[in-house]
Image: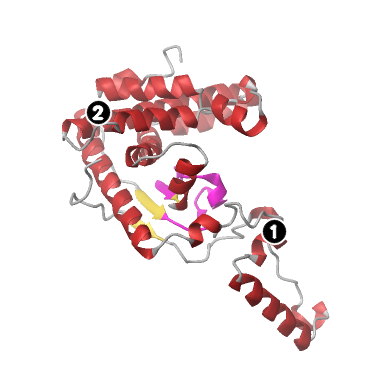
Amino acid sequence: MDWKGRRQSDNIEDRRGASSRGGNPFGRGGIRLPSGGMRRSGMSFKTILIIGVIYLALKFIGIDPLQILAGGDPGAIVGGQNQSERQVSPARQDEMTQFVATVLAETEDVWNGVMKSQGFDYPEPKLVLFSGAVASACGNASSASGPFYCPGDQKVYIDLTFFDELAQRFKASGDFAQAYVLAHEVGHHVQNLIGVLPEFNRMRQSMSQVEQNQMSIRVELQADCFAGIWGHYTAQKGILERGDLEEALNAAKQIGDDTLQRRTQGYVVPESFNHGTSAQRKEWFARGFESGRLEACDTFNNPV
């Protein structure tokens, strides 16, 4: 992508390095302070001092004691600061921040135009950058959750270290692959505005788990198609470079339910799919990319 030097969005909320507010960022398995104060806990000043020294020593050698106490793997992206995150240089962090701000600006330009042509307003979503864990209107989440959109506050959340994981773990490298992930989450924002997400959340209350999964696939594939619409208009601007489309299609393939299950457990369970197969995700992104039309993304009245 020829993204450098283009407009960057102001709709960025940077929470990196800040503690998660509104609850325990590690969920129910997280750290809880002893109730009743120091006297009732039975810990002496000397004990507390020793614990403090051990804590600092572990942090110094790169181990997060909070993850260990929470039952996490010190090398996994659970609650933040894994090995790859600690190795990201400030220059790399700055470049990734500029990149997502530019991609977000491009989605704003596209969806303001598309939604206006359909008679909809487009209140632009905020993009929240976080590290480790974050609190949203949809609850607390860790980096292990991956990027997500919360309709409750109309914000997209991402820990930028996910892009390294996308390339290294999921074999989906390239800046347009990264842009596809962000455009997919913005696609959920569009669904929220046109009523798809509210209707899904209403209907799922009376659905079985299998029915919820089937409907979730249609929701996710439509978000892929909306990401393709963004790609369509971005290509018209001359921003895309040779190989960019292949990067996005490869990313769609690598994060399909069937591919992920084969990689992680060696077999697939179709009844548990909730995002779509690799073939489906590639197909619906391509539909949006080729047409540039909302009508082409009707996953609810067409076979998927």
Decide if residue 103 is on the left or right side of residue 27. Answer: left
164 above or below 192? below
Which of disc 2 and disc 1 is earlier in sequence?
1
Q: Residue at x 63, y 65 (%)?
A: 63
Give the extent of the magenta segment: 129-157
Q: Nearer the viewer, residue 271 or 116?
A: 271
- Residue 265 can be seen, yes or no: yes
Residue 70 marker: 1
Is residue 268 one of those drawn in magenta?
no
Q: Residue furthest top?
A: 303
Circle 2 residues within 10 Å: few <14, some 14–19, many ≥20: many
Q: Residue furthest bottom?
A: 45
Numbered disc total: 2
Q: Which residue is mark 2?
A: 232
- Between marks 1 and 2, how big is the CA–CA gap? 44 Å
Q: Nearer the viewer, residue 273 or 61?
A: 61
Decide if residue 54 is on the left or right side of residue 178. Answer: right
Where residue 20 appears, as percent x and y from the top left, is 53, 62
Where residue 23 appears, as percent x and y from the top left, is 59, 60
